[in-house]
Image (cartoon, rainbow, N blue to C red):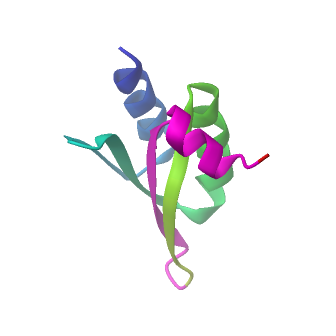
Amino acid sequence: MQISRAKAICEEFCEEVRVSEDAFGVEVKCILNIEYFTGLAERLSELGYLCSQVQGDVRRKKCAAWFSPATHENESFFNPM
């Protein structure tokens, strides 16, 4: 299952990983060191996941990032023509 692959990738990079599912779909929340964000985003994009939100804490050098599977609707939002 693709969500388990995404979760496994997140666990390589992150201190904390939470997976949730609701009426809008699946979302993965990751808490990680800011320097690992780019690598995580690149790996997850290979699986078809988009980053929907990032909140950084510069003092602690940490961030929280939310990822969800790309859909036809959000893919056009993140990749405008």
Residue 48 at what x, y percent from top left? 56, 29
At horizontal 50% and vertical 33% (from top left) the residue drawn is 71
Q: Position of residue 52 (x, y in %)?
A: 50, 55
Q: Describe residue 8's horizontal placement relative to residue 52 as left or right.
A: left
Pinpoint residue 60: horizontal percent, then vertical percent: 49, 79
The extreme left residue here reads: 22
How many numbered marks are there? 0
- The residue positioned 60% from the left and 40% from the top of the image is 75
- The foreground one among 47 and 63 is 47
Res. 24 image quadrant:
top left
Q: Nearer the viewer, residue 40 or 54?
A: 54
Magenta segment, which residues?
59-80
Q: Quadrant of residue 4?
A: top left
Q: Residue 41: within the magenta?
A: no
Question: Looking at the image, which is closer to me, 63 or 20?
Answer: 20
For this orientation, the residue located farthest to the bottom is 59
Whether residue 6 sits left or right of residue 41 in the image: it is left
Q: Which part of the image, by quadrant, shows the N terminus? A: top left
Is residue 24 or residue 41 the one in the foreground? 24
Q: Is residue 48 left or right of residue 23?
A: right
Q: Is residue 64 left or right of residue 24?
A: right
Question: Residue reaching furthest top?
Answer: 1
Name above or below for residue 37 compared with residue 73: below
73 in relation to 57, above or below? above
Q: From the top left corner, tell me how far across and down residue 29 is, in percent.
A: 36, 52
Q: Is residue 74 magenta?
A: yes
Q: Residue at x 51, y 65 (%)?
A: 54
Q: At 65% from the left edge and 60% from the top edge, which residue is drawn?
A: 35
